[in-house]
Image: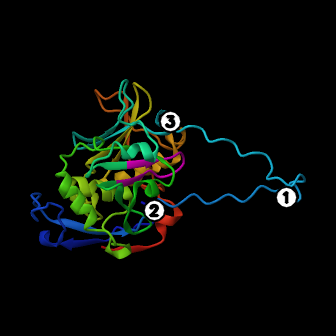
Amino acid sequence: MGNQVEKLTHLSYKEVPTADPTGVDRDDGPRIGVSYIFSNDDEDVEPQPPPQGPDGGCFPDGGDGPPPPQPQPYDPRLHEVECSVFYRDECIYQKSFASGSAALSTYTPENLLNKCKPGDLVEFVSQAQYPHWAVYVGNFQVVHLHRLEVINSFLTDASQGRRGRVVNDLYRYKPLSPSAVVRNALAHVGAKERELSWRNSESFAAWCRYGKREFKIGGELRIGKQPYRLQIQLSAQRSHTLEFQSLEDLIMEKRRNDQIGRVAVLQELATHLHPAEPEEGDSNVARTTPPPGRPPAPSSEAEDREAVAY
């Protein structure tokens, strides 16, 4: 996980925040905090320099040179990876392009507004960028974690021109009431840097909706057996599984896969990962942990700017 240092600090149960509106977290047991890296994985794409002639000057005709290539329409089936997330034997997340499913269809920001209700989770997607998650709070506005700060902005501004979709059904946890989701989001507007308990926009938005401490930094025990599995679908009959100690680690890897794209993920698995022998009765699934020298959830340079103990 980048240059993260595994520094464990014991916390009492009462010191761990809860998202339940009643102030009671029914999940008993101690939690352990860890050192972590603040994430800034939603940076804008750097602007490209204006086209120049062969000698570094303007083109001879005084124009801007040849027109830029038109961007290809965004197609989730081409750019995204089908995957499932398991906690032990329970499936807690699934992204599938099953026949007849319209859940992953994307819309322009203006059309997306017509589909949103307060408490909905919204995901903005674009090729070669990290997906950006937000909580719709009504009145055309969303609350989201952006550049180390939780902010409230119009949905059309938060999209930054990307297409979006409502993703309430990707995680299979039972959601809080819409009013509680909105309260969770609005209560953290203005929080930034060391006040944050999330490393990316997806973890923040999912925490607002489901209230699970697993989405928070250091929200669960990180020693012993790796209970989380990220199953990446390679084809209709084949999949590859990675194992993780925590949900936050797994989310970072899943987001990295979304950013580099389906083709790069499949090439990486074919080139760098060496599947273990499949278990009996599991002939189509290769299960590994990230190989030595590769962190479980690599991050961009912008994500490595600051590490502190939580």
Residue tagged by mark 2?
A: 2
Residue tagged by mark 1?
A: 58
Residue 133 magenta: yes
Percent across and percent down for residue 211 are 20, 57
- Label 3 neighbour load within 10 Å: few <14, some 14-19, many 20+: few
Residue tagged by mark 3?
A: 75
Percent across and percent down for residue 60 are 90, 53
* Viewer-nearest residue: 118 or 294: 118
Q: Which region shows up in magenta?
A: 123-134
Confirm whether residue 220 shows in the render: no
Residue 238 found in image quarter: top left
Residue at left offset 11%, top offset 65%:
23
Q: Amino acid at mark 3?
A: Asp
Q: Report whether 270 appears left or right of 90.
A: right
Q: Report whether 187 appears left or right of 73.
A: left
Indicate how the structure is coloured in the image: rainbow
